[in-house]
């Protein structure tokens, strides 16, 4: 279990606040045009979740309760920020409409102060404060499909929206917490080396790692991909992941390497890179007529 760290928690919550407010504003901007029920909050939540995944990688944060608190905070702020965005839109709409009116009746209002007053009374009411705006939304109701929700049902629908945001973000964040993590230097494992192995190079690897590969060597098409992961402090020899495909299908395999295995792997890599360097380099292609004429 990773330890709790104040400095990481502090940065994480700060990041959660910033990301939550920012994604909420983005959601309000898009939602002002189109906002399909359920799908929209799930989409917003997946954007929020991806940014939070970036956050825990950046901060090397794996303490689950801290992650949970930040996720909850970010989701609630995201939902709140979205409503604030709609409120600001309503304010701007109102100001635009008043300006339009005033431009149209400028000449007429100058003739009579009574007429100007009458016009003022016919203008739509301003959105008022944020709470007043929310109250108007409750009274007016929210249409979802064939239903018109009113009063506390609107509140419940907003809570459900926030819940979908949280659910989608958690769906991305939680599997990330299962990634290999080093509790000694408190960092996530990073990919330090990856590549493809030609089938001929696979035999020594299979022997070294005691891989469950049927012999004789599988014939092409046979592809192997490897990835070596290590924590930032390089506390362990690393973790090796292999994916290979043969006639039987796709296989994945992973192991925590020991010092001897890592040393032998390094030797295999070195041998492979020197054998590649020994290959004669192909002659440069002859210049085409176009290249010659442009010189
Ligand atoms: Zn480490």
Image: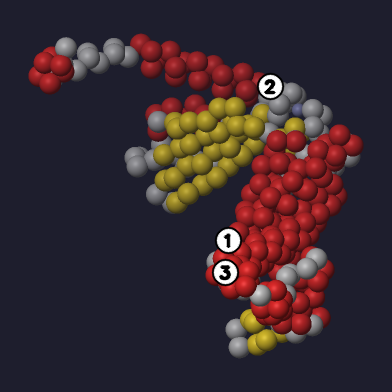
Residue at figure coordinates x 38%, y 13% from the top left: 277
> In the orientation shown, which residue stands out farthest toward the front?
111
Residue 184 is drawn in which quadrant? top right
Instruction: Please provide percent x and percent y for residue 246.
Output: 42, 46
278 relative position to 11: left or right = left
Instruction: Please provide percent x and percent y for residue 253.
Output: 58, 42
Quarter of the image containing the N terminus? top right
- Which numbered disc, 1 or 2, marks the residue that appears first in the sequence? 1
Residue 58 is drawn in which quadrant? top right
* Position of 215 relative to 88 (above/below): above
Q: Where residue 30 is drawn, which disc sits there?
A: 1
Q: Is residue 215 visible?
A: yes
- Which numbered disc, 3 or 1, marks the residue that appears first in the sequence? 1
Classify mark 1: helix, strand or loop: helix
> Which image quadrant shows ligand 1?
top right
- Camera-side mark, 2 or 3: 3
Do the residues under discs 1 and 2 have CB atoms within 8 angstroms? no
Identify the residue position indicated by label 2 in the image: 259
Residue at figure coordinates x 75%, y 32% from the top left: 187
Instruction: Please provide percent x and percent y for residue 122.
Output: 67, 80
Residue at figure coordinates x 45%, y 51% from the top left: 249
- Camera-side mark, 3 or 1: 3
Instruction: Please provide percent x and percent y for residue 24.
Output: 69, 56
* Position of 88 relative to 178 (above/below): below
Do the residues under discs 3 and 1 have CB atoms within 8 angstroms? no
Do the residues under discs 2 and 3 have CB atoms within 8 angstroms? no
Residue 231 is drawn in which quadrant? top right
* Pick the front one: 33 or 133: 133
Identify the residue position indicated by label 3 in the image: 107
């Amino acid at each position: 279990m990773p330890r709790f760290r104040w400095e990481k928690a502090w940065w994480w919550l700060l990041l959660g606040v910033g990301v939550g407010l920012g994604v909420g504003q983005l959601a309000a901007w898009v939602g002002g045009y189109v906002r399909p029920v359920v799908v929209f909050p799930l989409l917003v939540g997946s954007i929020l979740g991806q940014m939070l995944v970036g956050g825990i990688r950046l901060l090397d944060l794996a303490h689950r309760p801290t992650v949970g608190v930040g996720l909850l905070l970010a989701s609630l702020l995201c939902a709140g920020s979205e409503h604030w965005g709609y409120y600001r839109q309503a304010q701007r709409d109102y100001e635009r409409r008043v300006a339009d009116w005033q431009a149209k009746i400028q000449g007429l209002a100058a003739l009579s102060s009574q007429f100007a007053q009458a016009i003022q009374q016919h203008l739509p009411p301003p959105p008022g404060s944020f709470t007043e705006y929310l109250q108007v939304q409750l009274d007016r109701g929210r249409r979802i499909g064939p239903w018109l929700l009113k009063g506390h049902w609107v509140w419940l629908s907003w809570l459900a929206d926030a819940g979908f945001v949280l659910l989608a973000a958690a769906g991305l964040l939680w599997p990330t917490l299962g990634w290999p993590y080093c509790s000694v230097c408190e960092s996530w494992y990073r990919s330090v080396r990856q590549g493809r192995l030609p089938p001929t190079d696979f035999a020594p690897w299979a022997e070294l790692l005691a891989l469950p590969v049927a012999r004789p060597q599988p014939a092409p098409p046979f592809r192997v991909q490897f990835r070596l992961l290590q924590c930032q402090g390089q506390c362990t020899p690393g973790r090796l992941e292999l994916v290979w495909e043969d006639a039987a299908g796709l296989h994945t395999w992973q192991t925590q390497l020991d010092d001897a295995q890592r040393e032998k792997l390094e030797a295999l890599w070195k041998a492979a890179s020197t054998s590649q360097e020994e290959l004669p380099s192909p002659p440069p292609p002859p210049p085409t007529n176009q290249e010659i004429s442009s010189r």
